[in-house]
């Protein structure tokens, strides 16, 4: 009878970073398990990003009273500044007109004054109407800016989670490749050949190194 072939033992995979074990792949009964050892700093960052994302998502489009007051104060400041600019432009024009007409005609009860007055008032009215439109645009702007900041913050929190997940997945895959290379070596060694494993280990080393480039 032929000699029964020996089943090679399972070879686990371990990834160390700066002397710290990050990932371990091993067999437990009929299961292949890969554990990722998250550092305290990673866990704090991940938990903070995950909790902050959840906390802010429900109210991302909701403005509380303080936010509303802040946005309105920006619109009010814009309105007051616009009104001030219009007044600074047209009030001196009216005063100069009055003084000019009074010095020339002795009174303001004449057509020259009224014609010039109507012209100035028409221009001032046009400026006020334009300002009213600008104020509406400003209201939209401050609301959109606030929403943009909130969505940008949510995006940042999501990026933090995604980056940590990506790092974990890369190292987990490297650990599994490590384990697979070890098992291939064991299998080939059992069959009396080890040449193919040298290339496998070389490829594994290249893959692991590329994770940190």
Image (spheres, rainbow, N blue to C red):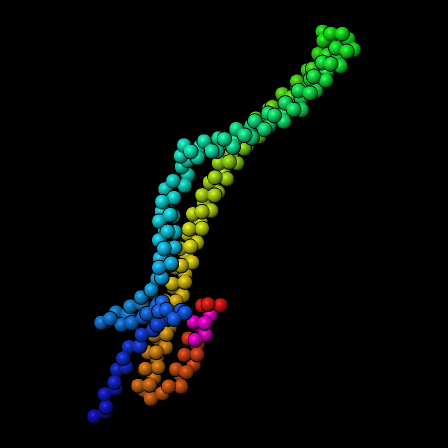
Q: Which residues are magenta?
A: 205-210
Name the residue: 35% across, 59% down.
40
Residue that sits furthest to the bottom in the current view: 1
22 or 26: which is nearer to us?
A: 22
Placement of 184 over or under 174, stated as above or below: below
Residue that sits furthest to the left in the current view: 1
Left or right position of 209 against 85? left
Q: Residue 130: image x %, image y %? A: 60, 27
Q: Tell whether position 136 is magenta.
A: no
Name the residue: 38% across, 63% down.
168
Q: Residue 162: image x %, image y %? A: 41, 56
Q: Tell whether position 209 is magenta.
A: yes
Q: Main secondary structure of the magenta part?
A: helix
Residue that sits furthest to the right in the current view: 104
Left or right position of 196 against 145? left
Name the residue: 39% across, 82% down.
197
Placement of 5 over or under 89, stated as above or below: below
Quarter of the image for the N terminus: give it: bottom left
């Amino acid at each position: 009878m032929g000699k029964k072939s020996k089943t090679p033992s399972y070879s686990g995979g371990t990834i160390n970073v700066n002397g710290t074990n990050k990932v371990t792949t091993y067999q437990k009964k009929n299961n292949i398990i890969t554990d990722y050892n998250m550092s305290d700093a990673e866990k704090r960052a991940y938990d903070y990003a995950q909790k902050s994302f959840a906390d802010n998502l429900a109210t991302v489009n909701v403005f509380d009273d303080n936010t509303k007051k802040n946005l309105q104060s920006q619109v009010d400041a814009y309105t007051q500044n616009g009104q001030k600019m219009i007044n600074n432009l047209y009030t001196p024009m009216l005063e100069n007109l009055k003084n000019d007409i009074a010095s020339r005609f002795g009174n303001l009860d004449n057509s020259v004054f009224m014609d010039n007055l109507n012209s100035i008032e028409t221009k001032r009215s046009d400026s006020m109407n334009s300002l009213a439109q600008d104020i509406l645009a400003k209201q939209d702007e401050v609301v959109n800016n606030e929403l943009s900041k909130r969505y940008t913050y949510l995006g940042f929190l999501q990026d933090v989670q995604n980056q940590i997940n990506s790092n974990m997945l890369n190292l987990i895959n490297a650990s599994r490749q490590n384990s697979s290379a070890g098992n291939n070596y064991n299998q080939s060694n059992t069959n009396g050949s080890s040449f193919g494993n040298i290339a496998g280990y070389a490829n594994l080393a290249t893959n692991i190194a590329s994770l940190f480039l």
